[in-house]
Amino acid sequence: MPVNSTNRCPFSGMPATAPTATKGHVDAPIIDLDPFDEATLASPYAMHEELREAGADVVYLPAYDIYAVARYDAVRSTLENWQHFSSAAGVGLANFNSEKPWRTPSLLLEADAPQHDAPRAVLEKILGARKLRQYHTDWRKTAHELIDGLLTGGQYSTDDGAIALDAVTEISEVYPLSVFPDAVGLQHGGLENLLPYGNFAFNAFGPRNRLVTDELDTIGPVLEWIGNQCPREALSDQGFGEDIWKAADQRHITEEQAPLIVRSLLTAGVDTTVYGISAVLYHLASNPDQYARLRENPQLVRRVFEETLRLESPVQTFFRTTTTQVQIGNTTLPANQKVLMFLGAANRDPRRWKNPDAFDLDRDPSGHVAFGSGVHQCVGQHVARLEASCVMEAIIERVERIEFTAPPKRKINNTLIGWKSLPIRLIPA
């Protein structure tokens, strides 16, 4: 099967928790912290400031023998310079030049030109904004049905007429799983595997810490299910998956590449959108004045999502590997060196954004790097924007206010930041 490595439990091919080797001489500020510490993952903002204000565009983290960039300009230039900062050696801590990947590498995330070009071109056409217009009506209808059902079903009603629920489990997870699998062409059985798979895949970009090892005993059947959804015979004859296979028929890609491209949709197509929608609801509940403004000006829906992505980027980090000796600022990095890019820190860099820790709908958030930048920029970003806008439009039409009923709880992941629980009240309009 073309995606055979998807099906095995990934005990090997993953980096150890913390390499002990440290370079004899490092021409950069040395910061003795662990970016994958669970408390730091839950609230990385103090670390972000320390990294940005260390006195240079690049710092050295001896805990993992890696360099890191956290300032906006350095992160963006690293993202866009694929010739010197490669994705093909893995976008996680593991270096594929010397370590075996835990699965067959992604043709989108973990490849450079020319191997990256054809798969990217195929998905750009399939997931482009123009192609997605055909889904607008159905996805908006599904969002309205979801919110209407929550408001009128009685299951979550309180004595004062409000609706109390967990926004993560009842909105953010439910909606993407109601529209995206059908758009891909997946069969309905087994869809509960999508969220655990995405969670594991993004954890696996980090070290082999507790977040990874706790899942090793249970992830095998999930990986097997994912692999089984990628062949053509498993997909419906309508959807993104079939479109990928038609591209193979037309020889834009090979038949060996097609299932790996389908797998890319299943890896990054659900979790990141769930995290993004949850972040939107969190910031609208935290900023009632901004929510009222959004209700008065629904055309701000797109800006709300972009400002949320800037402020709370679901994908916080990715790695690159230097292809040759290369300069970042005043620091020279050797070849074959892992570089950790802090996307979330870049998006709060005061050098780029005024009052960067505020949720501000007067801000122009364009230029954020939540979706990356350059040739590896997220190819599914238009899908995420459409899903989020559909949910927001349904909510602002029917809900006057969003309020917290209890403190939210973070979901901890080596790469992503988001909410495990978001207890809120929806006050109907």
Image (tube, rainbow, N blue to C red):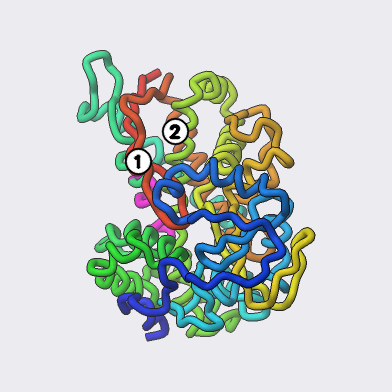
Residue at (49, 31) in percent of width and height: 283
In the rendered image, residue 177 lying in the magenta stretch gets the answer: yes
Q: Which residue is mark 1?
A: 168
Circle 2: element type: helix
Q: Amino acid at mark 2?
A: Tyr
- Pick the quarter of the image with the N terminus: bottom left
Magenta part of the chain? 174-185
Between 43 and 84, the one lying in front of the other is 43
**Mark-to-mark CA distance, 1 and 2:** 10 Å
Q: Main secondary structure of the magenta part?
A: helix
Residue 141 visible = yes
Q: Residue at x 58, y 57 (%)?
A: 131
Q: Position of residue 303 (x, y in %)?
A: 61, 36
Q: Percent from the top left, x then y, of residue 315?
A: 51, 53
Residue at the (67%, 27%) spot, across then down: 362
The amino acid sitting under disc 1 is Val
Name the residue nearer the viewer: 269 or 201. 201
Q: Confirm or deny contact between disc 1 and disc 2 (CB under 8 A).
A: no
Q: Quadrant of residue 170?
A: top left
Residue 186 covered by magenta stretch = no
Circle 2 sits on which residue? 282
Secondary-structure class at tag 1: helix
